[in-house]
Image (spheres, rainbow, N blue to C red):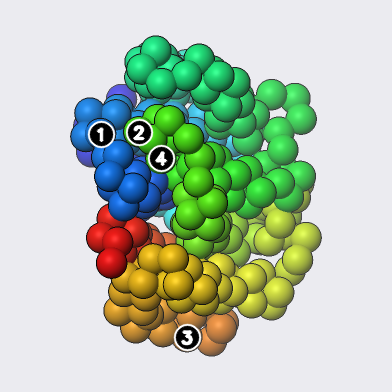
C-alpha cells in the first residue's frame, strides 16, 4: 500500500508550476485592466491544479497498465512500480477531474456557460493524453496539448472569468507561459527517450531524436523572454521578466552539454523554478500598468 508521501510523489509536485503560473498571469492581466476578482482567481487555480494532478495520476494509471513505465529513470510511478493498485490510482485521477469540473461549473455560473466547452475539452485532453485506445501523447501531440490547455486556454480563460472578455494582451501573455509549460514536458520526455522508444511510445522527443529535442528545450526557455520584451510597449513592466534570465543558463548548459538519464531529473526542478520566477515577474509586470 502506497504511503501518503508516495501519493504526493505520484502527483508530481515539480509539474505544478504549469498549473499555478497561467492562473497567476491571467489574473495579472485582469488586475492591469482593473478587473481582478480574487475569488474567481482562486477557483480558477483549483481547476488548474486539479487538472494537473488529475492528468498526472491518469498518466500514471494508463502508462502503468500498458507497461510503459517499467523502464524509466524518473521518480517511481504508483502503478508501474506496484506501489498502488491501478483502480485506486484511477479513482484518484477521476476525483481530481470531478473537483475540477465542479469548480469550473462555479466559474461558468458566475461568468459564461460557454466555458463548459473548453472545460470539457480540457478534461477530455487530460484523460486521452495517455488514456483510451489511441492516446495522443503516444503520437507526438503532448506538447501541442500542453501549449493550448496550460498556456492559451489557462491564461486567457483566467482573465476572461474575471474580465468578461478576452484581450489581445491575455493571448500574448499566454504564449511564453505555454512555452515554459512545454519545456517541462520536453525535458521529461528527453529523459525517457530510451524507455519510450522501446515501449512504442512515440513522443515528440522520440520523433525528433536526442539532439533536436535538446535544441527544442533551449528554445522553449529562451523565446518567452523575447516575447515578454515585445509586450513592453503595451505593458512596460513585462520586461521585469529579464530578472529571471540568469535561471536559464544552468539548465540550458546542462541540456546542451548532453547531460542525460537521471542527470536530467534535477533539470526538471530547475525548469519549474524558472517557470515560477518568470510567471511571478510577468504577473507583476502585467498587473502594474504605467
Task: Tell me whether the residue at label 2 lies in contact with that at label 4, contact meaning CB atoms closer than 8 angstroms.
Answer: yes
Q: Tell me where residue 131 appears, x and y as whole percent.
A: 64, 28
Residue at point 71%, 56% (across, down): 204
Q: Disc 1 to disc 4, how far (Cα)?
A: 10 Å
- Measuring from the top left, give residue 281's x and y in whole percent: 29, 65
Residues at marks 2 and 3, CA–CA distance in whole angstroms: 40 Å
- Mark 1 or mark 3, which has the lower sequence index? 1
Quadrant where the N terminus sits is top left
Above or below 19: residue 95: above
Gap between marks 2 and 1 measured at Cα: 6 Å
Query: What is the crowding at mark 2: few (fewer than 14 residues within 10 Å), some, or many (at least 20)?
Result: many
Residue in the picture at 44% in, 66% down: 234
Inspect this view and state whether residue 8 appears. Answer: no
The answer to whether the residue labelled 2 contacts the one labelled 1, judged by CB atoms less than 8 Å apart, is: yes
Find disc 4 in the rendering and name its residue: 159
Number of the label disc, if any, that sits on residue 37: 1
Amino acid at each position: 500500500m502506497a504511503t501518503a508521501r508516495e501519493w504526493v510523489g505520484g502527483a508530481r509536485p515539480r509539474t505544478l508550476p504549469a498549473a499555478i503560473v497561467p492562473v497567476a498571469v491571467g489574473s495579472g492581466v485582469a488586475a492591469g485592466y482593473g478587473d481582478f476578482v480574487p475569488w474567481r482567481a482562486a477557483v480558477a487555480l483549483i481547476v488548474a491544479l486539479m487538472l494537473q494532478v488529475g492528468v498526472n495520476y491518469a498518466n500514471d494509471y494508463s502508462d502503468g497498465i500498458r507497461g510503459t513505465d517499467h523502464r524509466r529513470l524518473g521518480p517511481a510511478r504508483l502503478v508501474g512500480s506496484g506501489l498502488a493498485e491501478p483502480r485506486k490510482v484511477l479513482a484518484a485521477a477521476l476525483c481530481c477531474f470531478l473537483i475540477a469540473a465542479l469548480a469550473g461549473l462555479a466559474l461558468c455560473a458566475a461568468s459564461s456557460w460557454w466555458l463548459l466547452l473548453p472545460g470539457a475539452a480540457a478534461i477530455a485532453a487530460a484523460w486521452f493524453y495517455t488514456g483510451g485506445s489511441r492516446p495522443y501523447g503516444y503520437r507526438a501531440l503532448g506538447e501541442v496539448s500542453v501549449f493550448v490547455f496550460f498556456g492559451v486556454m489557462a491564461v486567457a480563460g483566467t482573465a476572461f472569468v474575471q474580465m468578461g472578455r478576452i484581450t489581445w494582451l491575455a493571448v500574448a501573455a499566454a504564449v511564453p507561459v505555454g512555452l515554459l509549460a512545454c519545456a517541462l514536458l520536453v525535458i521529461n520526455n528527453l529523459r525517457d527517450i530510451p524507455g519510450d522508444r522501446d515501449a512504442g511510445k512515440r513522443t515528440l522527443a522520440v520523433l525528433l531524436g536526442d539532439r533536436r529535442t535538446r535544441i527544442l528545450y533551449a528554445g522553449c526557455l529562451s523565446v518567452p523572454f523575447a516575447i515578454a520584451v515585445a509586450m513592453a510597449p503595451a505593458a512596460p513592466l513585462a520586461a521585469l521578466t529579464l530578472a529571471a534570465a540568469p535561471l536559464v543558463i544552468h539548465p540550458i548548459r546542462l541540456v546542451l552539454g548532453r547531460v542525460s538519464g537521471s542527470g536530467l531529473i534535477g533539470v526538471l526542478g530547475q525548469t519549474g523554478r524558472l517557470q515560477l520566477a518568470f510567471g511571478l515577474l510577468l504577473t507583476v509586470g502585467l498587473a502594474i500598468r504605467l
